[in-house]
Structure formats: structure tokens, C-alpha cells
Image: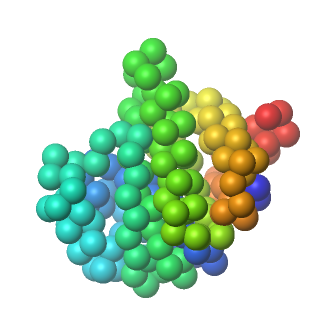
Amino acid sequence: MRLVQGDITRQPVAAIVNAANSSLLGGGGVDGAIHSAGGAKILEECQQIRATRYPQGLPAGEAVITSGGRLPAAHVIHTVGPEWNSGHKGEPELLASCYRNSLRLATENNLKTLAFPGISTGIYGYPKPAAAAVAVREVRQWLGTHTVPTTVTFVVFDDESRRIYEQALAEI
């Protein structure tokens, strides 16, 4: 596991994870940045997924994969995190499912390097320390029982998130 402060759309990895909304059609934050940097191909593939597999939208905790379009990463794994609602409506389990399903897709597609943003920590309001703890725990457990991916990078945007992930990586 690695920690990088920077722009997830510029990571030289096999796949990046998109903290998507259920529409899969782009939005704000990480989702908007990925769609903008990756270009129309990602949107076209997301529209096809919506038309064929998830006409009502991708449910929270699930994940799907597309190409990376113009991104350095060859693939994007889109996952929908839970909206924070006091933590008593299954949010920790749904967030853990986001990480497990993303890691499963990476393994199934033999993607050796993967980069995650902080899922659900933006507009969905998940407390960053709690989200980082779930992220680090799930990735550590996966890496302990699977050979792919070989490297998982947590990409944070700001100093606060970097400190939170440094603490989570040290504790768990």
C-alpha cells in the first residue's frame, strides 16, 4: 500500500477508482475530474452499462469497469459510496463493499496497480477518519489473500486527508 498526495487522474497505474454517483454519467469532485480528463469514451461506456446492466443506476457498494479513455490508467473502476447518515444505516458495510468490489474487478482483470480516492468523503459526507480506516482495513485484508493487485495507492488531494491516511496506515 502506498499513499500519494496529488491528482488521481494523473496516476500511472493500471486502473483508478472513481467515486461515482449512481447515474455513472459524471458529476462533481473526483467523478467530474475523471470524466473530464478521460473524455467521451468513459461516458459512452458508462451509458452502455446503464442501458444494459443498471438502468436504474449503479447501487451503492457495487462497482463496474470501463476503459480509461485519455487517462494514463487503462481502466476506471466506478463505485458508488454510501451517503453518510449517522453511520447507523449500513454505511460502513456499504463502503467496505465499494473497496471489495473494486478490488475484485482489479483481480478479475489482472490489474496489478490500482489507485483509490477517498470514497464518499466529499459531498456524500462520510467522515474522513472513519472512511480511511475502512479503506485501509479492506485493502490490507484483500492484499493479504490475493496476489493481484500487487500495489494499491491511496491518492489524497489535500494535507488533511494525507495526515488522516498516514494515521490510518500506521494504526491498522
Residue under the image location 44 percent in, 77 percent down: 68
Q: How many marks?
A: 0
Could you tell me residue 18's position as x and y percent? Answer: 45, 58
Q: Residue at x 76, y 55 (%)?
A: 1
- The quarter of the picture where residue 8 lies is bottom right
Residue 67 appears left or right of 103? left
Q: Could you tell whether 154 is left or right of 53 in the image? A: right
Q: Position of residue 94 (x, y in %)?
A: 45, 33
Looking at the picture, how far across and down is residue 100, in whole percent? 54, 45
Report which quarter residue 10 is drawn in.
bottom right
86 vs 26: above or below? above
Image: 15 above or below 166: below
Picture residue at 21% right of the left edge, 56% below the top: 53
Residue 139's place in the image compared with 126, above or below, is: below
Residue 81 in which image quadrant: top left
Residue 120 position, x and y percent, is 47, 41
Query: Which is more toward the observer, 39 or 148?
Result: 148
User: Does residue 166 appear in the picture of this structure?
Assistant: yes
Q: Quadrant of the C terminus?
A: top right
Q: Which color mode does the image show? A: rainbow
Residue in front for this viewpoint, 144 or 129: 144
Instruction: Name which residue lies at 30% across and 80% down.
Output: 41
Residue 30 visible in the current orientation? no
Residue closest to the far right: 170
